[in-house]
């Protein structure tokens, strides 16, 4: 029997929070799985309260502020939302009933939390032996650090990547975005997809112990082998490359505009010299071959900076690329969102939110990272509002009566409004600009994004 | 080989360098049969990239190649010959998945485009990995990891406020893409297994970087705000930056719900820090220079490990900046049995990072990378039925 989407028929209980679990849940949901996000009105996903630098519409939390968060809406598309208070035995029972009719449980609490709820893998697998349960956390379910706490910014250091990131001879430099969480999200997704393949073959479910600490180090696998092979500890090298020169980031016209340029061989180097209209450079003995260019990078960078600083970043990129030299403009958020290539590849999907998500309306988000020729993916549905699918899930799947639903609402085991929650604190735009948290504020952003 | 989670899956691997081989590593390490097609003579380009064992450039001793190609088989085959193309077509008949990472258009020019292969095997999943994708104005642009960082918007927000933007160390964009390609391929496999239908997936490094990278984009999408690198004000502590200790760096993290006084206590500075000067985020920005000075003075007499364990015992989420050496010697990773020893004819036994996650019911296999053309006889003679004399002729004609 033909079916439309790859994971149609797979039900996922997604009790995860922040990014690492929820983004994995979104990928599975976008593949066609029925993903039920489980929160409690008493303890919603923290990202619902994230006012984080301009993270609610026009920086003004209003109305149902718990449904307004930019990052929550970006990370939870295509899911359903069920609220369940797991500190209440009735909440636990309902969770267990759902486990019996689900395929996957995805959660990223520290190891003791699910056990304290009485929802460890032994319990859940006895209810449903074909269940796949993923436990994802910073340091994993066993070992001396298993109860240690982790956040994206600490994992960046743990996985060995931060050690390698920074200006030459300077301290490690952190990213301002939570990329390790999304890295972990991809491993969460992979682990579930691999376990699903195994289940297809054997019929058996299993438990997945995911430590961000471990999967993260795969990104520095070659550096780890350099140490185990040669005893060498690789250090920070700024934007430089082990064997390409030039390989750097150069200033362009404007206040904070830059372009990256890389030349990997003599042909590309000659092309770069020609494009800069300095053909004699190609004959300069300091830059005669790859090795001499590697040894004279400071001089090289000065020459290239002089040329680029008179020019527009996109002009430099397109000109050099047309001559066969690798180059890329350093785009800021507005630049990325306006980039012609990304637009041509339909990178931005328009999502229209429910009125219950006050003022969010229609926004754009990056689409899923794949382009498929044959699978007919529907447009993304908006992230659910808190408790949006309480009835659909509890009545549709578990067959609860109206009275039972009402009782659960009265006991605050389910709901749609967090009790006593305060709107997120947001800093005024002017203060954010002054402190350099935000470089500029574009009042015409809705027009730029084609949303007005 | 042990029965892995993916036993029985057949993957034809026409990839090279990093992103493509990383994608197929997720198949081979979990038990799929991954057959790597390499160029006769030189093989996968990553075989020429360092670091090498004892810094001796040798195509069987590249750390990059050895790490990325564990548990795969290798045959050599010249795809620019008619015989080469025909052999691929023969192998495609039995493959579930084909992954390739040539520049866009190369597979078509070889006569191995999706339109040709789907006729041979209608349920084939073909995954094409490229820098900028199979379509769009930058399709044929060249890239390095740094250039992908630049165009993704990530580079603009990494670095010091007034200095040039920075890429991250190593090649994270390539790794991110390998993961994304593997996810997408597993997705399409479910489609294949349920419907019998095949698919062609277009995976680009730039898409892979941007799709999950919304934390720098959403301030603009929701409020018109453009983020830049580390905030202009607020010092190291408030920028959540790495701070120096006696022997390296820590990342002091104040959990959202953590009381400031508890943080002060956890770093042994209750008297100095638990006061109005520092107790609110705004006050910490106001007095950031003094705060940095107090913390750095305290940290310089402690090791990063001491600070990590001491603060964690108070429930903080302090992080440590780990080098490759720290990781290999980490007691936690070693108690969990993360690292594995992999023996290899050209290098002898070496320590590798092990399974990225632990599956309770599926063993993970710590196999090695193949020698160039190691499986030529197995595949050409035992599987495809050529004779040893044919192999000699193939070799003479530059086909294998």
Image: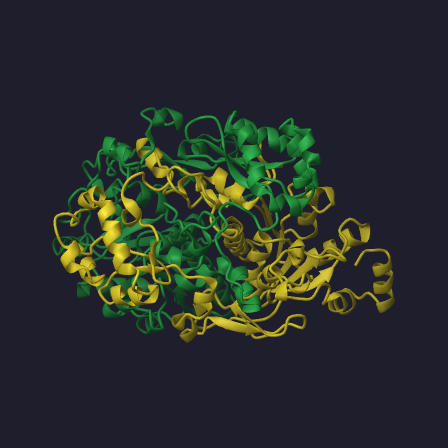
Chain colours: A green, B yellow
Left or right of B181, for residue B300:
left
Left or right of A431, for residue B198:
right
Query: Which of A414 and A445 lies nearest the eye of the viewer?
Result: A445
Find residue B47 and report its image quarter. bottom right
Query: Which of B181 and A215 lies nearest the eye of the viewer?
Result: A215
Q: Residue at x 57, y 75 (%)?
A: B2
Q: Residue at x 37, y 54 (%)?
A: A20
Residue B251 visible in the picture: yes
Find residue B321 and report its image quarter. bottom left
Quarter of the image with the N terminus of chain B in it: bottom right
Give the x, y percent position of residue B152: 47, 40
Left or right of A283, for residue A304:
left
A172, above or below B378, in the image: above
Give the x, y percent position of residue A171: 40, 51
A222, above or below A56, in the image: below
Query: Which of B218 and A438 lies nearest the eye of the viewer?
Result: A438
Give the x, y percent position of residue B87: 76, 56
A50, above or below B16, in the image: above
Residue A391 visible in the picture: no
Quarter of the image with the C terminus of chain B in it: bottom right
Find residue B251 and report its image quarter. bottom left
Left or right of B145, for residue A391:
left
Give the x, y percent position of residue B396: 86, 59
Q: How many tags in the picture? A: 0
Query: Which of A450 and A232 lies nearest the eye of the viewer?
Result: A232
């Amino acid at each position: 029997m033909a079916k439309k989407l790859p994971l149609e028929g797979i039900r996922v209980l997604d009790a995860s929070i922040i990014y690492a679990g929820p983004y994995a849940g979104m990928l599975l949901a976008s593949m066609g799985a029925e993903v039920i996000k489980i929160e409690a009105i008493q303890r919603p996903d923290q990202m619902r309260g994230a006012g984080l630098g301009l993270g609610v519409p026009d920086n003004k939390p209003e109305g149902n502020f718990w449904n307004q968060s930019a990052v929550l809406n970006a990370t939870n598309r295509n899911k359903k939302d069920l609220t369940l208070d797991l500190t209440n035995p009735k909440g636990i029972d309902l969770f267990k009933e759902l486990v019996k009719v689900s395929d996957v449980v995805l959660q990223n609490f520290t190891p003791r939390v699910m056990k304290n709820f009485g929802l460890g893998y032994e319990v859940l697998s006895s209810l449903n032996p074909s269940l796949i349960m993923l436990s994802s956390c910073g340091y994993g379910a066993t070992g001396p650090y298993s109860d240690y706490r982790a956040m994206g910014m600490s994992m960046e250091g743990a996985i060995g990547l931060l050690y390698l990131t920074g200006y030459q001879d300077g301290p490690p430099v952190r990213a301002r975005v939570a990329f390790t969480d999304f890295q972990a999200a991809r491993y969460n997704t992979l682990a579930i997809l691999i376990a699903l393949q195994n289940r297809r073959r054997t019929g058996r479910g299993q438990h997945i112990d995911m430590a961000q600490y471990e999967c993260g180090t795969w990104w520095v696998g070659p550096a780890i082998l350099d140490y185990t092979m040669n005893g060498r500890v690789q250090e920070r090298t700024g934007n430089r490359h082990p064997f390409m020169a030039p390989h750097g980031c150069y200033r362009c016209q404007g206040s904070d505009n830059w372009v990256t340029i890389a030349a990997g061989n003599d042909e590309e180097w000659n092309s770069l010299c020609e494009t800069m209209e300095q053909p004699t450079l190609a004959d300069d003995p300091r830059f005669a071959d790859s090795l001499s260019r590697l040894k004279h990078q400071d001089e090289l960078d000065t020459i290239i900076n002089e040329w680029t600083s008179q020019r527009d970043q996109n002009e430099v990129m397109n000109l050099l690329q047309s001559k066969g030299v690798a180059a890329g403009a350093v785009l800021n958020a507005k630049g990325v969102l306006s980039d012609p290539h990304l637009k041509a590849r339909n990178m931005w999907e328009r999502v229209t939110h429910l009125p219950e998500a006050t003022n969010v309306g229609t926004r754009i988000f990056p689409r899923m990272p794949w382009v498929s020729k044959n699978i007919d993916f529907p447009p993304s549905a908006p992230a659910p509002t808190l408790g949006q699918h309480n009835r659909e899930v509890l009545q549709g799947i578990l067959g609860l009566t109206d009275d039972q639903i009402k009782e659960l609402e009265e006991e605050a085991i389910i709901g749609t409004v967090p009790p006593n929650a305060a709107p997120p604190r947001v800093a005024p735009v002017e203060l954010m600009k002054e402190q350099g948290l935000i470089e500029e504020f574009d009042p015409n952003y809705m027009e730029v994004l084609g949303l007005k | 080989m042990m029965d892995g989670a993916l036993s029985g899956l057949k993957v034809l691997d026409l990839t090279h360098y990093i992103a493509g081989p990383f994608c197929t590593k997720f198949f081979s390490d979990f038990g799929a049969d991954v057959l790597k097609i390499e160029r006769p003579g030189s093989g996968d380009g990553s075989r020429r990239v360092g670091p090498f064992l004892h810094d001796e450039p040798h195509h069987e001793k590249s750390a990059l190649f050895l790490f990325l190609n564990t548990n795969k088989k290798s045959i050599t085959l010249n795809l620019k010959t008619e015989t080469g193309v025909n052999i691929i077509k023969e192998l495609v008949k039995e493959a579930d998945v084909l992954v390739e990472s040539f520049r866009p258009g190369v597979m078509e020019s070889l006569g191995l485009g999706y339109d040709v292969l789907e006729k041979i095997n209608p349920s084939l999943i073909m995954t094409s990995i490229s820098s900028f994708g199979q379509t769009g104005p930058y399709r044929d642009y060249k890239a390095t990891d740094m250039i992908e960082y630049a165009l993704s918007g990530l580079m603009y927000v990494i670095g010091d406020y007034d200095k040039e933007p920075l890429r991250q160390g190593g090649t994270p964009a390539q790794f991110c893409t390998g993961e994304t390609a593997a996810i997408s391929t597993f997705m399409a496999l479910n489609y294949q297994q349920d419907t019998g239908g095949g698919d062609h997936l277009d995976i680009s490094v730039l898409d892979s970087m941007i799709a999950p990278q919304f934390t720098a984009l959403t301030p603009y999408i929701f409020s018109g705000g453009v983020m830049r690198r580390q905030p202009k004000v607020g010092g190291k502590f408030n920028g959540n930056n790495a701070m120096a200790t006696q022997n390296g760096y820590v990342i002091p993290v104040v959990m959202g719900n953590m009381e400031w006084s508890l943080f002060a206590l956890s770093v042994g500075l209750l008297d100095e820090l638990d006061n109005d000067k520092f107790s609110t985020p705004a006050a910490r920005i106001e007095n950031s220079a003094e705060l940095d000075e107090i913390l750095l003075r305290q940290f310089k007499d402690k090791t990063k490990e001491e600070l990590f364990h001491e603060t964690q015992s108070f429930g903080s989420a302090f992080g440590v900046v780990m080098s490759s050496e720290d990781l290999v010697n980490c007691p936690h990773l070693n108690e969990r049995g993360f690292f594995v020893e992999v023996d290899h004819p050209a290098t002898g036994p070496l320590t590798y990072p092990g399974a990225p996650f632990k599956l309770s019911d599926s063993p993970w296999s710590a196999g090695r990378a193949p020698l160039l053309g190691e499986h030529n006889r197995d595949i050409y003679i035992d599987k495809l039925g050529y004779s040893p004399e044919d192999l000699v002729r193939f070799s003479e004609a530059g086909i294998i």
